[in-house]
Amino acid sequence: MLGTAPDTARETDPPDEREPEERAESGRPAILRPDAWRDMLRYLRPQRRLILLGGGLSLLGGFSGLIQPVIAKSVVENLESRSPVMAALIALTALVLVSAVVGAIGTFILMRVSESVVLSTRREVIRRVLWLRVAETDKIPPGDLMSRATADTTLMRSAVTTAIVETVNGSVMLVAILVLMGVMDWVLLLTTLAVVLLGGILVATGLPQLESAARRAQEGVAELSTALERALGTFRTIKASGAENSEAEIAERGARRAWRHSLKVARLDSLVGAFITVTIQVAFLAVLGVGGARVASGAMSLGSLIAFLLYLFYLVPPLGALVTAMIRFNVVAAAMSRVSELLRLRTEPESAPRPAPAPSDRAPAPASLSFHDVVFRYPGDGPVVHHGISFEIPAAGMTAFVGPSGAGKSTVFSLIERFYEPQSGTVLLDGRDVHELDLGELRAAIGYVEQDAPVLAGTIRDNLCIGMPYVEEDELRRVVDQARLGELVARLPHGLDTEVGHRGTKLSGGERQRVAVARALLRRPRLLLLDEVTSQLDARNENALREVITGITAETTVVVVAHRLSTVSMADRIVVMDGGRIRAVGTHEELLSEDALYRELAATQMLLPVSELEASAARIGDTLGERP
């Protein structure tokens, strides 16, 4: 039995529903925006202990390096006074080694954390993508989704080592160095700060442009991924149409866009590096001039000036780390905003995997189905697909939907499966609204064969057992025989374990359809939805599949969308749709007599001569007229 829906908290959107443009606070560097830090810390919080350990070791290595100028000062002073310097040199060597070892350990820990952040982000994105509502996947092309799951999440690697730890460590080291410089000579410190602040102002002006360029570069990569996914998904069609050049131009457009904006990022990055170099050089010249004058006047010693100059060059790593952190933070923020857009898309509730039926299991009772005043349109500005349709399908038997293309037949199946939600009206399964049923159990009760009968890369066994990893061999043999796949499996080199190629390219269209039918039958569905399942079958296999369908209608409710007369005429009831409305319901004979559209469809789409149709309609009319 189908249960009631569990807690659907996952179906609600995450709290922050603002669009990226609203959250970006345009004009402010990401490193100054609370929302960017909030997003960053959400990914880093689970790794906070390792981040503290790695950052602490890196900071310790940096602090041990700060003592080196003090020892160097004592070496110079000892040389001036002709005192021994061996002990100071040994201490200096030991400090260098300790600083290198401790720093290397800290760096390794932080790199490990970085990879862990990338992994956890990708896992979250993967699970988000696979549980997206079908309507949400219409908003972002598959190639863009793949780009966000791969290229954008890769940039999260910089979130730990560069954007967070180097920001903190660089700030602490910078403060420590400035304090030591102030202890040595506050005049030279003020001289240094004046030059450094001027350079910092120049650097800060380019950061908002860098974030914008980084985001557009990632969008270019996504455009490239989308174009390649589209081309590879229809590779044979492109080859047959000679469309390689046009498709290459579409893909290259995204590559050029990524290149153009990546160059802008590189240009801004190089300008920032140049600003830092110039700033330090100007500071060196200023300190050398002012400090030389102070040494000459006796205000400070030569050793103090040399130590101060060493500290000045020690400013380069923390200053570079801070600027690099700001640059990388803006790049990471651009990637995070794209990932966050994906994570804000609505998802379906997760359902636990259902065990595969065993051969001894009793067949479930067939389901009844009904639509009541259902109105539906696809998300966006598209036209209304269903205009208040209503129909009843009793349990067991076979019902066929026919009508011209665009009548809304396949959309009926999408609403039953809850791929989309109707604007109004209700869809009932066994008299219960499908929205009140647990989604996992609802779909477990339904077997669905899509119009193009998709087959995934892997083996035939993999395709049959999708969503049911533990299936008994007896069950597999049952559905293989039912779907008339036995002959195919017997001639394959590895039987059910034969690879079928990307999207089943090693199988014919009819073989792919039979694999899809067998996959649906393996679920022992209470309701079987078949969308044009005989369209690619030859007469022999079509007849065999009709026998399969006829054989299961006593224990399963079968609903088909079909155009071939051979499939439609065997249905217990036929629903004629036109323009999103139910035009007529009846048997094949009744509709031939009573509905002009059905007669036209039978003549054009079902390959029955008009003369035979007219004769059949006349005979049926006479028969109906003779009834008491």
Image: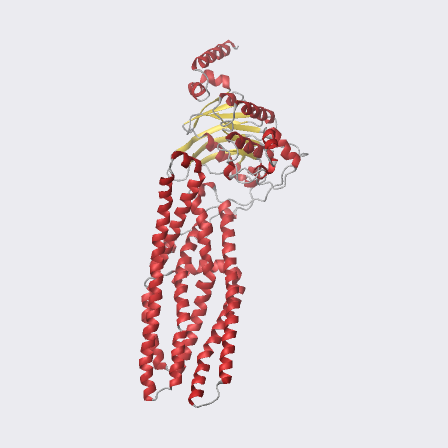
Residue 517: x, y in percent?
56, 31
Residue 369: x, y in percent?
53, 30
* Residue 585 versus residue 621 in the image, above or below: below
Quadrant housing residue 599: top left
* Residue 500 versus residue 407 in the image, above or below: below
Compared across the picture, whether 456 is left or right of 294 comes to: right
Quarter of the image containing the N terminus? top right
Which residue occupies 48% across, 35% down?
Answer: 414
Front residue of 108 and 607: 108
* Residue 522 versus residue 161 in the image, above or below: above
Which residue occupies 50% across, 58% down?
Answer: 117
Front residue of 358 and 20: 358
Residue 510: x, y in percent?
52, 29
* Residue 586 versus residue 114 in the image, above or below: above
Regarding residue 256, the answer to whether it shows in the image is: yes
Residue 494: x, y in percent?
61, 37
The residue sitting at the right extreme is 360
Front residue of 517 and 398: 517
> Which of the colour schemes (rainbow, by chain, secondary structure, one colour) is used?
secondary structure
